[in-house]
Image: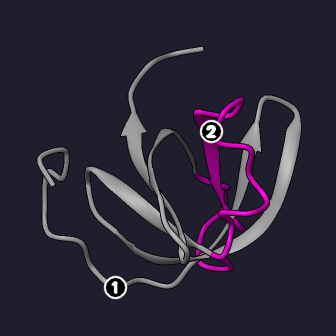
Amino acid sequence: MEYRYAERSSVIEQVELWNGKKNYGEFETKDYCSGGIFVKNCQNKVDTHSASSLTVKFCHNPNLSYQASHHAVVVHKTDNGLGLKWSHRQY
């Protein structure tokens, strides 16, 4: 797919998906790269029509003293989850 900037690595992380103040829940990633991320088993929980832009918050990691988050847009929806592309816009 042309929007992928690098090869995706199989990395399992716990993330929360947010749209503004609405929390869709905690999910597991399948893989990610510098261009985006694939989140498993969230396709029926996130309303992709009203939430085309999401915030991906990486859940607490005991090795970090902060919680990382990134803005992303939904680029595809499958039976396995959502493919998200990182968005670099400021709010």
- Establish if 65 lies above or below 56: below
Q: Residue at x 41, y 83 (%)?
A: 11
Q: CA distance from mark 1 to mark 2?
A: 21 Å
Q: Residue at x 65, y 63 (%)?
A: 43
Determine if residue 18 is in view: yes
Q: Position of residue 33 (x, y in %)?
A: 28, 63
- Establish if 70 lies above or below 80: above
Neighbours of disc 1 within 10 Å: few (<14), some (14-19), many (20+) = few
Neighbours of disc 2 within 10 Å: few (<14), some (14-19), many (20+) = many
Q: Which residue is mark 1?
A: 10
Task: Specify start and end residues of the magenta stretch as a single range.
Answer: 41-68
Q: Is residue 44 magenta?
A: yes
Q: Residue at x 50, y 85 (%)?
A: 12
Q: Position of residue 21 (x, y in %)?
A: 87, 32
Q: Which residue is mark 2?
A: 54
**Local SS, label 1:** loop
Q: Quadrant of the C terminus?
A: top right
Q: Position of residue 6 (x, y in %)?
A: 13, 60
Task: Give the prevailing secondary structure in the magenta stretch.
Answer: loop
Q: Is residue 86 magenta?
A: no
Amino acid residing under circle 1: Ser
Nearer-the-camera pick, 90 or 20:
20
Amino acid residing under circle 2: Leu
Q: Position of residue 46 (x, y in %)?
A: 74, 51
Determine if residue 60 is in view: no
**Figure coloring:** one colour
